[in-house]
Image: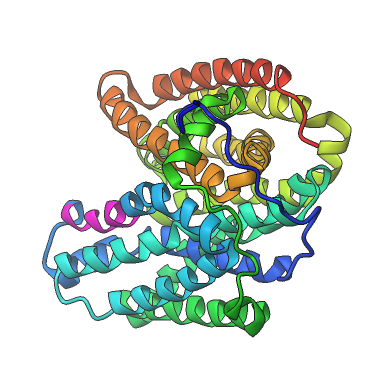
Amino acid sequence: MATALTSPLPRVILPARMVMAVPIGLLALSGFAVGAGMRLLDPLLPQVADSLGVTVAKASAVIAGFMLPYGLGQVVLGPLGDRLGKLRVACVAVVLYGLCSVACMSAGTLTALVVWRAASGLFAGAVNPLMMAYLGDAVPYEERQATLSRFLTGMVMAQMLAGPISGVIGQHAGWRMSFLVLGVMAVVVGAALAIRLGARVWRSGEEAGSRVPGLTAYMSLLHRSAGRWLLLSAFFDGLCLFGAAFPYVGAFLIQEFGLTVSSAGLVIAGFGVGSFLYTRFARRLVRRLGEGGLMLLGGLGLAAGLAGLALSPNWIVAAGLQIHLGLMFYMFHGVLQARATEVMPDARGSAVSAFALALFLGQTVGSLAFGALLAFIGYRAGFAAAAMGVLVLAVWSRVGLGRLPRPE
């Protein structure tokens, strides 16, 4: 008898294609609320440190306190969404995330702030993966990447706006007010989402899907060649980009070109501009280039952009490259995200959460390794090394994609 480790998942009968119960704009607002929470403290750490009587280095624990539960919580959040309903779990998570963010404003010690940030990070981790999995249920695959790009507009806008807005609020009303504004916004968005879902969904089993245990779902994903390809691609995507390159651009601009912190922040915001361009043109790009062409062009473009950073003669060139990198990143990453929603339709929430976890683990390893490497080779050589890593990743991922059957 086949064991759970090697047998395919039990087939769950889903509608041929669900009708979207929630407008994409409301889902994007939820993504904005979560994305804003990730970037909220970027300009506020010195203020937080001064208020709580600690150093900036110690205050940075509130960032790790958010990200660790966000990433590691994927182990249980995906299967929970598959079992109870993706939108229902995501909706409750948005509200709880907002309440925990409000609670952050009352923290009187660094420990209390880290605890509330950890709780908000855990609930935030349920939102984007489960909403992406829901879109996988509701949208035909040929339209999915374009739809996912519209959903990701919320996250992209958060990357662009959260830091500057929280900085303005913090400057005039203190860092605690930034948490209050974020928390209230998240609760309001969550309430609107709950109302839109309707009482019938909350009373019945509608929107619930797989009853497959989480461990069985994850083992089945690893047993599939498409699953292994997806998770390895996500891990090295996180390692080379989220961990090894993107987080250090600001420090590079400040130390290499003498920019102020605020000026460096504006330059980095160019990444969001490039990302936003992708959300506007994703449908055309997919139709013209196909998934394989889009992934390869995006990966090669990322490698070229990182190499360009290594050779940048001034901050103006680096600013232009940030726009380029934002567009190329989502061209490459968007294909992976779309495949994550289709690699295991019977347990889609678990699959997308596993993708998010692999990305997070890669980011963690990459940030530690690249931070240590910089002490020996410097920023420019570090970006060059990241470019070579992305070049290998782009070719490997494209070859692997070509060997997989195209989703129906």
Residue 67, position in %: x, y? 35, 52
- Taking the image as shown, residue 34 lies to the left or right of residue 304, namely left
Camera-side residue: 103 or 257?
A: 103
Occupied quadrant, residue 125:
bottom left
Task: Please say if 304 is above or below 189.
Answer: above
State the residue at coordinates (63%, 35%). 336
Camera-side residue: 160 or 250?
A: 160
Occupied quadrant, residue 298:
top right
- Asked whether residue 281 is in view, the answer is no
Inspect the magenta stretch and tell me whether residue 59 lies in it.
yes
Residue 394, position in %: x, y? 61, 21
Residue extending farthest front? 1
Task: Report the span colored magenta.
Answer: 58-66
How would you classify the magenta stretch by its main secondary structure?
helix
Task: Please say if 53 is above or below 252.
Answer: below
- Asked whether residue 384 is in view, the answer is yes
Residue 96, position in %: x, y? 41, 74
Task: Please say if 1 is above or below 152.
Answer: above
